[in-house]
Amino acid sequence: MVFRDRCFWSLILSLLLIGVFGVVKPEPLDPKVANRDVRNWFWANKVHNSMAYDLLLLGDSRLYRGVSPAVMKDVLGKDYQILNFGFSSGGLNSRMFREADKRFAKDGSGKTVVMAVTPYSLTVDAAKNEHFLQEFTRPKEQVLQFLAYNPFWSYLNSVSPNMLRKKILGKERNPQVYYYE
Amino acid sequence: MLFNSLIFLAFAAIFFALWPFANRWTNARLAYLVVASFIFYGWWDWRFLFLIIASGLLDFVSGLGMFRYPPWKRFFLVLSIFGNLGSLAAFKYSGFLAENFDALFAKAGFVTNLATNIPDFMLILPVGISFYTFQSMSYTLDIYRGELKPTKNILHFFAYLSMFPQLVAGPIVRAKDMLPQLLVTHRSTEEERFSGLRLVTQGFFKKVVIADNLAPAVNAAFSATELAPSTLYWWLVITAFAFQIYCDFSGYSDIACGLARWMGYDFAVNFNNPYIATSLKEFWTRWHISLSTWFRDYLYIPLGGNHSGTVRTYCNILVTMLVSGLWHGAAWTFIAWGGIHAFFTCVERMTDWPSFLKRVPLGRLLASIVILMQVWVAWVFFRAESFSQAIEIVKIMFSFSGHGGASLGWDAEFFLTIAVLTELCIYFKVFASFKSRFLFHHRLEPIFLSFLIAICVFFRGPGSEFIYFQF
């Protein structure tokens, strides 16, 4: 086989293998917990999307792990736009209120904020809102990659050998933590 | 721009699509290479392009000056070395030097505050500064020794200095090897393109599959607020780090060599299975070969090498190793890393113990194990967050304590096992026949390569920078 053919067949077989494995590879029970790319999309979307909302939930990790906008929508109506704006060690201060204000519908009937207050969320450390700032100041090209390319590449999301092993042995358990959009 | 990023994929696709057109005329090729390399580097921070340009211009002019005005040779050499080491001192070592001067003066009762008065821009370490500075210096040093004629074409010089595959993390290519290659209009052959594909795939496998999957376990161990007390655990962590840094750096070199081969150029091998060495001397002929030969040719031999008496030879080894440690980073831990290598190298030279050991049954294997233990201990200092942490870890490694768990996590252990088994197969020459019979068999190699590519896509670890970018 000449070298040109070797190159050609290497690339064709790679595409074939990637195509097949992309279809048959196991998906985690909760991709937001197990998959880095999905997690990156989740945070970038929370901070950088330009949607307008009717209700914002403000707070820390207890909020984004514990309160589901989807469940609230079931009660309030599907057209009601709700954003879980919780961040790890998130503090409640004027900075976050201003950020919340930017995300409300300009002609909306009401601007509702639900705050999840914990003792820590009122401390000076929490007021730094480091997690929010980390996402907020992320370079534009990275945000673009997380929001625009990564969903397209989700087919190529990586798997770990351990996940593969658990799937094969039927040992995978429901994750202990959940992230709510 | 990282090799393991989407943006590099786009950059490389455009570069190689246009390369055949630029490759028709010498100046077009050189200009294209310079512009592409500047875009590649400037993507990180365009302001630091001025540093490469200034450093390059100084060496370009110094090279021409040495050639045209031989009586002023020494002056131009000093100018070049002063400029290059000056920029290294300013951007890489100023913080370290200032902190240590402050501490020294404080002991004498003076308050100097040098560290707090360093301008902010000098606290940013320009990516790859140690690599391109050394590459640039080798150009003027070779001209000074009469081993190289300077180029009069500034594009030719900057194409050599800034060639993007090796710009930020080596290998440190020598001007006398690279300058002639750049002048020849050579279209890469099908064989070169295929071997380039093989190298790039192998490099990505080492980096994104092995190194990136080992990194989280190693980082977790070193960043823990309290060090785990188990001896076995720390030997495992250091073994993981040894393979992480090896796969990270040699992976980068493989990708760089592969990309160069696609262009039709040839870079010398930078790593040659260092962990199968049976002596430290051999280890240094296998690890980061372009840097160790640089130090050998431009520091160790000019100091007198091993031809100036026994004591002087040991001093030369010590100086070379300490400078090599300092080259890697501005911290005492890196200097200690160099010092440990110097100590073990001197002991080996004094006693020639590997030769004795190799004469007994299983001695060769034993010699390799002892060498690995020495290298592992040195890696502790290389990776530790502080000098005191390194000492603490070494103590635990030799305390034979069984307290605490010894697990790195299933994934890290899985990839570590693959890395260790591969190295063992190379050591016992299992691959030698297997490779030629199966893997590199012309019909089977595409299957093997395509599996590697698919593994790189689906089993990649959390993306991270190449470790050697910080040097």
Image: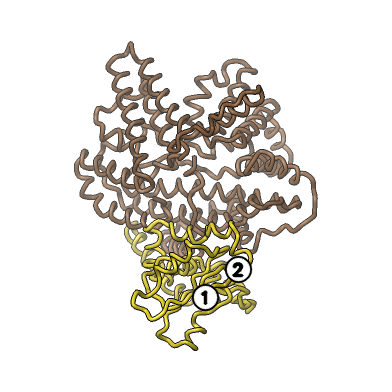
Q: Quadrant of residue B130?
A: top left
| Residue B437 visible here | no
Label 2 sits on residue: A162
The chain whose colour is brown is: B
Label 1 Cα neighbours within 10 Å, binned few <14 / some 14-19 / many ≥20:
few
Camera-side residue of A3 and B402: B402
Kindly state the secondary structure of the residue where label 2 is placed: helix
Circle on res. A114: 1
Residue B104 falls left or right of residue B211 = right
Above or below B210: residue A150: below
Residue A135 lies, in percent from the top left, at 46, 61
Residue placed furthest toward the top: B71
Tell me the element at label 1: strand
At label 2, the amino acid type is Asn
Q: For this rendering, which residue is in front, A131 or B318?
A: A131
* Chain letter belonging to callout 2: A
Mark 1 or mark 2: which is in front?
Answer: 1
Q: What number is the disc on residue B470?
A: none
Q: Which of these two is toward me, A54 or B39?
A: A54
Chain name for mark 1 = A
Asked where in the image residue B442 lies, by quadrant, the reply is: bottom left
Amino acid carrying label 1: it is Val
| Chain with yellow colouring | A
Q: Position of residue B237 (x, y in %)?
A: 66, 51
The residue at the point 32 percent across, 34 percent down is B53
Asked where in the image residue A101 lies, by quadrant, the reply is bottom left
